Image: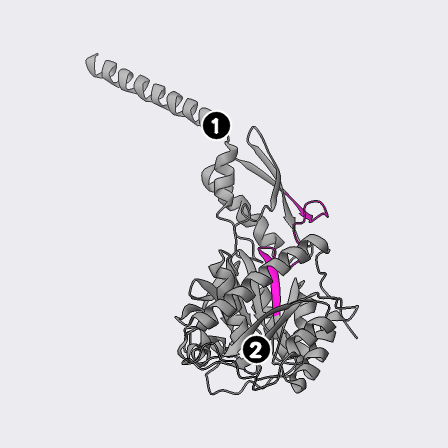
């Protein structure tokens, strides 16, 4: 009888174990689902447009939990988004990693006027500033780089988009020659990861082509590159994105205003009359009714020559008054004047912009310009409606 008793006791113990496991399983099925855990899980799901997680982007709305049912809404720029299915499945997978028993119900909706934070395809960027000129050789890229670094010194998060596809000089000015951006895949779609220089995010076609390679592109190809730099780049949150435009008025300028809402434009000129004539044309493009981009102000470059040995002397090599004239025509302000100083040229060639150097004249000039631009942007945003993306022009 003893072996039988032992077998009976073991069988009874196993039965109790099974009952206990079943009870625990039922208990797990009734586990309380914590909304904080859901939110943490959803931070692993990326917005394919910006590369940020959907919680940071405030895309998740109306999260509700009822038993094992989890319901919420994901807001998209458009219900025609090519990523909506991938985004839906990614959310379900992320939640079921922590709550396998959960029934996840996701409603997809388009942004409403009340919930949409920005009409831009770059909602993580607060202000987009175009730096433009009427002709080449006036120091537009130099102004763009030093303006960006000046805004950064004022405490802002800044990035630079080198949109001068035919003559990309930003890589040289920031010491990034020969560097290549990384590619990161979001839902099987390639995204460009910006390079960094002095803590700023930077994108340029100069990172893609060889330094001696000629960029021979027609209108549609030019537009495609600009759109890719805007829409397929994983820009992190920025206070300012500085866009260094090519000189003149062409396909790149039109593509940019048709792709993103430009907060305002900074015009760069020299004092001489021939530069002003071309700058007025570039300025008037932004002021066209169908484009309607505010002019934040004018930077007059090469205003005078000051020898290092004679810092108080000013030689007006290109005349005077051009910047004030252009500011008056644009009904804006003169943001600042930059003298001809050897350190500016050296800084651009060596990859250490003048505002980071030891020359007080140039440091002060560019920092004052940055302060004035920040002030003009604040006034513009306070007094005017946000710029709208330009509809397709015939």
Pick the residue in front: 39 or 176: 176
Q: Is mark 2 on a helix, strand or loop?
A: strand
Q: Percent position (x, y) of residue 129? A: 61, 65
Task: State the image quarter where residue 343 is shown.
Answer: bottom left
| Vertical relation: 102 (above or below) 265 | above
Pick the residue in front: 269 or 265: 269
Alpha-carbon neighbours of circle 1 within 10 Å: few (<14), some, or many (≥20)? some
Q: Percent position (x, y) of residue 371? A: 55, 61
Q: Is mark 1 on a helix, strand or loop?
A: loop
State the extent of the magenta-drawn residues as a range: 107-130
| The stretch drawn in magenta includes residue 213 | no
Q: Residue at x 62, y 53 (%)?
A: 84
- The residue that label 2 is drawn on is 301
Query: Can see residue 121?
Result: no
Query: Can see residue 326?
Result: yes
Q: Which mark is residue 31?
A: 1
Identity of the residue furthest to the top in this view: 1
Pick the residue in front: 256 or 146: 146
| Vertical relation: 107 (above or below) 28 | below
| Vertical relation: 208 (above or below) 152 | below
Q: Which residue is drawn at 48% across and 36% down?
A: 37
Task: State the image quarter where residue 199 is shown.
Answer: bottom left
Q: In this view, does 359 lie to the left or right of 217?
A: left
**Front label number (2 vs 1):** 2
């Amino acid at each position: 009888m003893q072996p039988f008793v032992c077998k009976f006791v073991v069988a009874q113990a196993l039965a109790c174990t099974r009952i206990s496991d079943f009870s625990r399983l039922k208990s797990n099925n009734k586990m309380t689902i914590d909304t904080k855990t859901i939110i943490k899980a959803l931070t692993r799901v990326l917005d394919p447009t910006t590369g940020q997680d959907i919680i940071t982007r405030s895309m998740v709305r109306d999260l509700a939990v009822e038993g094992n049912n989890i319901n919420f809404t994901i807001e998209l720029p458009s219900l025609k988004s090519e990523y909506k299915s991938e985004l839906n499945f990614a959310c379900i997978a992320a939640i079921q990693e922590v709550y396998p028993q959960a029934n996840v119900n996701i409603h997809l909706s388009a942004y409403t006027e009340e919930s949409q934070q920005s009409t831009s395809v770059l909602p993580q960027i607060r202000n987009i500033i175009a730096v433009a000129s009427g002709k080449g050789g006036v120091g537009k890229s130099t102004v763009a780089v030093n303006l960006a670094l000046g805004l950064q010194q004022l405490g802002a998060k800044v990035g630079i988009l080198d949109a001068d596809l035919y003559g990309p000089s930003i890589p040289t000015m920031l010491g990034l020659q020969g560097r290549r951006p990384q590619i990161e895949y979001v839902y099987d779609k390639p995204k460009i990861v910006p390079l960094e220089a002095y803590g700023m995010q930077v994108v340029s076609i100069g990172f893609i082509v060889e330094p001696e390679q000629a960029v021979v592109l027609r209108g549609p190809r030019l537009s495609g590159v600009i759109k890719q730099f805007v829409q397929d780049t994983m820009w992190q949150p920025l206070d300012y994105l500085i866009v260094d435009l090519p000189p003149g008025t062409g396909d790149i300028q039109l593509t940019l205003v048709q792709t993103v809402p430009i907060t305002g434009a900074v015009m760069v000129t020299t004092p001489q009359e021939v530069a002003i004539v071309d700058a007025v044309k570039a300025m008037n493009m932004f002021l066209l009714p169908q484009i309607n981009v505010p002019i934040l102000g004018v930077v007059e470059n090469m205003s005078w020559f000051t020898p290092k040995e004679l810092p108080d002397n000013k030689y007006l090599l290109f005349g005077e008054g051009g910047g004030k004239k252009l500011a008056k025509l644009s009904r804006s302000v003169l943001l600042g004047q930059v003298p001809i100083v050897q350190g500016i040229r050296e800084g651009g060639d060596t990859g250490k912009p003048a505002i980071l150097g030891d020359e007080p004249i140039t440091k002060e000039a560019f920092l004052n310009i940055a302060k004035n631009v920040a002030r003009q942007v604040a006034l513009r945003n306070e007094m005017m409606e946000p710029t709208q993306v330009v509809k397709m022009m015939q």
